[in-house]
Amino acid sequence: MDNIRKIWDQKGSKTAILQMLRVHGPMSRIELTQLTDLSRATISVTINELIELGLVHETVLRQSTGGRPATNLELVPYSHMILGADLNHQTWTLGAFDLLGNTIEKKQISFSPLTPEAAVQALVCEIPDFIKQIDKSPIPLLGVGVPGLVDTHNGLLHSSAVMGWQQVELGSMLEKALGWPTVVLNRSRARGLSECRYGAGKDYQHMIYIGIDSGIGAGIYVHRELIHGALGGAGEIGHTTVDVDGPLCPCGNNGCLQMMSAAPAMELEARKLLRMGTPSALHMQPGFDLQMLKAEDICQAAEQGDELASQVVHNAATYLGITMANLVNLLNPEAIILGGSIPKDCPSYVQTAVKVMRQRAMGQLSASTVVHIGEFKEIGGALGAANMALDRHMSFAHFSPQSSMVK
């Protein structure tokens, strides 16, 4: 069977075409010829074989005024399934997806204690039953998104302040327990990849994703591919300095962006102002407890016109806007996608950040950069991680009926 698979895709043409359609979406035969450097004859023969195998189909682009109608080629929905998982505190979000980014099934998996061993065991033990419920064998690959500095090339989690973990060989732990090739990447980078391929950034080749909630992380995407950096740290904007005299960050630096613009920073500033007696409707809420004040409460009050909450939101968003301006000047993206709970809950936060970005970035570069809110919630990390696993390990052998079996 292995020899047959090699003959089926001897020149890698099927893998190349499937990968192009995955990453870039539907396209014509001419576009595939240009992007893959395959000959027209090879494209034609390979496409016909992929259509016969039920992996690709043609769709009519528009009505033709004469001759043959123009068509695009795209992947067949639900023909194959990939798995990904996203780790948030002590809960995995496990998802099953088709090659077009459609969610087939998802599940929350909690674990305790907060150790790498418990996390791996909980996820691996759940996967077989999860697959049985779907009644469809996945491609035997796994992608996982986790918070922290991750060396994706080696599957190594260098450090995660949120988890309290250091130097965890998460990739090899999962591969040993599951028996599948496993790819590990930063959760924000994973979530950004899902936006880049299937969400708010799907119409752009060059974009930046910024996730803002309890921390701030980013992903940089060029030609719809994630830029990793030497250690997988490209996109750690949460730890860029925006105030040299700002509060101490767990990373050891002062005035990091996440200490000024993330949810905990907003909560601390609001509590400080309330203790000083600044008027606000926040403390008038039934059962109000200053220690329990959350960023979502501040966002809601700001949208309702509360002055204290509006001031907190404005200050936090201003620092983000400055950072966005620096990114625009440095990388000149087509789009910036803002994800996470803060942008979704607080339009005024986004409006202020965008206003500051346009004021401080070079005019021509800023004018050509659009800003959108991310479309995915918690499932985005699992989807992006699954896609990264397939990016790194994709082979046409995965698409034969006998390749997608759980070990």
Image (cartoon, rainbow, N blue to C red):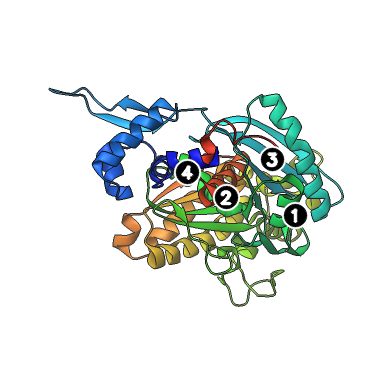
Contact (CB < 8 A) between labels 3 and 2? no
Q: Residue at x 42, y 53 (%)?
A: 207
Callout 2: 10 Å neighbours few (<14), some, many (20+)? many
- Residue highlighted by disc 3: 93
Name the amino acid type tagged 4.
Lys
Name the amino acid type tagged 3.
Thr
How many numbered marks are there? Answer: 4
* Residue 132, x across and y down, in percent: 71, 27
**In-front residue for pair 389/353:** 389
Mark toward the start of the polypeptide (1 vs 4): 4
- Residue highlighted by disc 1: 173
Mark toward the start of the polypeptide (1 vs 3): 3
Quadrant occupied by the N terminus: top right
- Residue highlighted by disc 4: 6
Q: Is residue 390 visible?
A: yes
The residues tagged by marks 2 and 1 sit, at their Cα atoms, a distance apart of 20 Å
* Residue 344, x across and y down, in percent: 56, 42
- Can you tell which mark lies on residue 190? 2
